Image: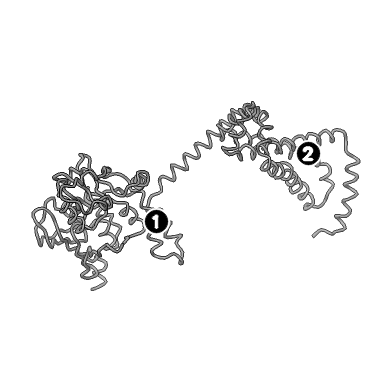
Amino acid sequence: MEDPSYFLSLIPKCFNLLLLIQPESILTLAVVVVLLTISAFVSGSEVAFFALTGSDIEILKDEKSKSVDLIVKLLSKPKKLLATILIANNLVNIATIILLTMELRDYLDTIESTLIRFLIEVVGITFILLLIGEVTPKVYANKHKKSLAEFAAFPMYFLFNIFSPVSAALEFMVANIDTKFKTKAKDISVDDLSHVLELTSHSNTTESEKKILKGIVEFGLMEVKEIMKPRMDVVTFEYDTKFTDLINQIVDAGYSRIPVQKEEFDEIVGILYIKDLLNFINQSDDFEWQKLIRPAFFVPESMKLDDLLKEFQDKKIHMAIIVDEYGGSLGIVTFEDIIEEIVGDIKDEFDEEEIIFTKIDDNTFVFEGKTPLNDVYKVLEIEGDDFDEERGDADTLAGFILELAEHIPQKNQKINFKNYVFTIEAADRKRIKKIKVSIKPDKDENENLV
């Protein structure tokens, strides 16, 4: 700690320094003042230009001046303008530091204390640059952005052209760096994001919140065919149905939107919104309810869920018909189906609880054939990588069995797949209805049991 009397002894030296200022020193200080003024001007211009909003520019355009035209021209290339400002500001600041350091060198050599020299040479000069060249002009520019932008338009346009080659090179370098970062970001997999999610989840995060976050991470990579309701499970109305029969079918179905077909599911003609029938509920059989059918929205099976969600929002609809590459209808997907992929099952007072599987023991389960593979993974608590390698185009457990067997297996037939045994519990000539899934213990587990 320096003696306070030492600091007091420096005061006379400072006065003597002022008396001994040489004419060349006065010139140097004048240059420093000019450079600080330029630094303040450039810093203030940065805030003035980039703080202008669209409405501010529209107000300035009413003046129809040359400076406003230059402002618009400069802001049309914001990256190049920013590069010009940074180059000019840094050059001026470096020149200021060099001149001040050279001018103070002889005096600093007379000071024995390293701390005092540091305070003058680093802290003092930095404080002057920040106060005069950065903070003060930017505060002023924030309050008077329009007038300062007009005042700075011509000088900044001059600097813009002077430093154009350098700023263009900087802009190119930044663009390449940005592209590399973006490319690297694209290489991050869903598994990586899920792992990060597990690491960042703290004890206060509930299981339901973790599931929602994981659903959001995986959401963008899922295709609509993974969550669609297959055609065999879709309730439809025949186009030629009589009105009274239609009302009875609506009551039995319990849905608010139902596809209408001609003869078969591949010929969907539109969607019937039940609310459109409320004003005609007492009509007779000759009522032409077909006029109330709304157009159906068809999407390919490979469409991503996030893209479909945006389409639903833009078109203000809640149901889409899924089609394959040949134009055949595969099933339907609803707005509710998409949301459930993020937040989990949504049940209302009209939904019936469906038991999609039966757990016999820890290693044995019975599933409906139409159970989606994603649901099977959740029940078995597996990632499903082994299944995904062999699933082909299958989305359900029955479809996966067909991919393995390459034919419709008969009842009680067993199919082995890695450490799983699939036993057909119920089937007919057209489809597999029920499947028992048995998980064989790993070898390591068997050795531990001996």
Residue 48: image location, x then y, percent: 65, 38
Say whether residue 201 is left or right of residue 388.
Answer: right
> Residue at (78%, 37%) from the top-left corner?
33
Say whether residue 418 is left or right of residue 200.
Answer: left
- Quarter of the image containing the C terminus? bottom left
- Spatial CA distance of label 1 from label 2 is 57 Å
- Quarter of the image containing the N terminus? bottom right
- The residue that disc 2 covers is 102
Q: How many marks?
A: 2
Is residue 144 visible to us here? yes
Looking at the rendered structure, the kind of residue marked 2 is Met
- The residue that disc 1 covers is 194
Residue 419 drawn above or below residue 121:
below
Q: Residues within 10 Å of mark 1 (few under 14, many from 20)?
A: some
> Residue at (28%, 47%) from the top-left corner?
320
Residue 384: image location, x then y, percent: 28, 56
Among the two numbered marks 1 and 2 on one chain, the one whose residue lies closer to the N terminus: 2
Residue 221: image location, x then y, percent: 34, 48
Quarter location, residue 294:
top left
Is residue 390 visible to us here? no
Which is more toward the observer, 247 or 367?
247
Residue 179 drawn above or below residue 120:
above
